[in-house]
Image (cartoon, grey):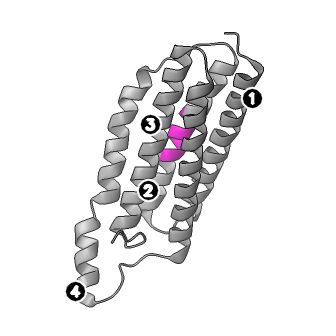
Amino acid sequence: MNFTTKERYLLEDQKNQEKLCVQKYSSYAQLASDPQLKSIFQQLAQKEQEHYNTIDQLLKGQMPSMGQGSQGGGQNQQMQMQSGGQQQSGQQTGQQTGQQTSFTNSDKDLCNDMLVTEKYVSSIYDTSIFEFRDPQVRNILNHVQKEEQQHGETLFKYMESKGMYNVK
């Protein structure tokens, strides 16, 4: 593949962002107090590592196989079910006792940081999709961006289920 200077810079930036996501999710999995959140962070760290590897392959001139993406969609649905599965029981408990659903401020801060990070990373992909000439590369970046958005949705649903994010 023959990338323009701008395309190469965009890929390098995305690779750095993916590396940061892997580091943050891995670190936050260790810091989270809720076992469910630890699991979500660990799974998302693995997906971010796949994204990192995809971008790295592109930079090396290789066309990555997107066959794993179809499996990843099922994994994301599973994470969403895990993050939203306790929503109803948690809200009922909070309503019955008149108290907020229990969570640590630390877990909330970790979730908020990762949700903001996912929003930012998704926006980088959005810009890049329009900047690349090769339609195959645009499709790959679009696929990764969709998964980033799913990560954000997983975090949002978890936060909502724990009373960390109230939509009114």
Q: CA distance from mark 4 to mark 3?
A: 38 Å
The amino acid pointed to by label 2 is Leu
Residue 73 placed where, x, y %?
A: 36, 35
80 vs 110, left or right, is left
Decide which of tag 2 and tag 4 comes sooner along the chain. Answer: 4
Dot 1 crowding, Cα within 10 Å, few <14, some 14–19, many 20+: few
Q: Earlier in the sequence, mark 1 or mark 4?
A: 1
Contact, mark 3 vs mark 2 (Cβ under 8 Å): no
Q: Are marks 1 and 4 in contact (CB under 8 Å)?
A: no
Q: Is residue 2 magenta?
A: no
Residue contact at pointers 4 and 3, CB within 8 angstroms: no
- Cα–Cα gap, marks 1 and 4: 54 Å
Per the rendering, the mark at residue 155 is 2
- The residue at which mark 3 appears reads as 146
Identify the residue at image location x=56%, y=19%. 137
Circles 1 and 2 in contact, beta carbons < 8 Å: no
Which label lies toward us, 1 or 2? 1
Q: What span is colored magenta in the figure?
A: 44-50
Residue under label 1: 9
Labels 3 and 1: the sequence-earlier one: 1
Find disc 4 in the rendering and name its residue: 96
